[in-house]
Image (spheres, helix red, strand yellow):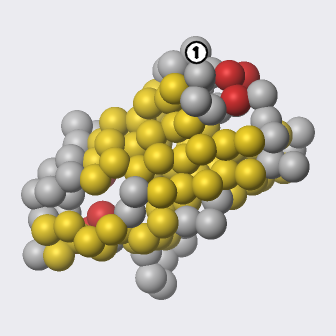
Amino acid sequence: QVQLVESGGGLVQAGGSLRLSCTTSGIFFTTQTMNWYRQAPGEQRELVASIARLGSTFYTNSVKGRFTISRDNAKNTVYLQMNSLKPEDTAVYYCNTQLAGTNYWGQGTQVTVSS
């Protein structure tokens, strides 16, 4: 059974930092590309960052230079370090991976950035 469990969200002032964690089970973590998505109220879910099994990364333009995705294969965990947060980063953040054509999602963690 695939499980993705996010943690680390919260309320922070603009300019602050948060680190999100996603701990996984039921997958061969070391072979998986791991993704962070976010969804703001009234908006579509968007891909924020990805990290491939060998460590190559992707970031959406709006977070480049502020967010860093990383993985710890020994802990089956992917992280999203978020610095210089802006009010427009407010959203529910979801961990995601795809396995055999199926998308798996965590329950989401709320990030709220006050101005």
Q: Along the horizontal axis of the image, is 81 left or right of 36?
A: left
Residue denoted by label 1: 54
Q: Along the horizontal axis of the image, is 26 left or right of 31?
A: right
* Residue name at image x 34 percent, y 36 percent: 68
**Whole-percent x, y for residue 21 in the image:** 47, 47
Residue ranking furthest to the front: 75
**Whole-percent x, y for residue 100 in the image:** 88, 39
Q: Along the horizontal axis of the image, is 33 left or right of 19?
A: right
Label count reads 1
**Whole-percent x, y for residue 17 in the image:** 21, 52
Density class for disc 1 (Cα within 10 Å; few <14, some 14-19, many ≥20) is few
- Residue 73, above or below 39: above
**Can the viewer see residue 60?**
no
Looking at the rendered image, the quarter that the C terminus falls into is bottom left
**Can the viewer see residue 9?**
yes
* Residue name at image x 61 percent, y 55 percent: 5
Amino acid type of disc 1?
A: Leu
* Residue name at image x 14 percent, y 57 percent: 16
- Residue 3, above or below 98: below
- Which quadrant of the figure has residue 45? bottom right
Q: Secondary structure at mark 1?
A: loop
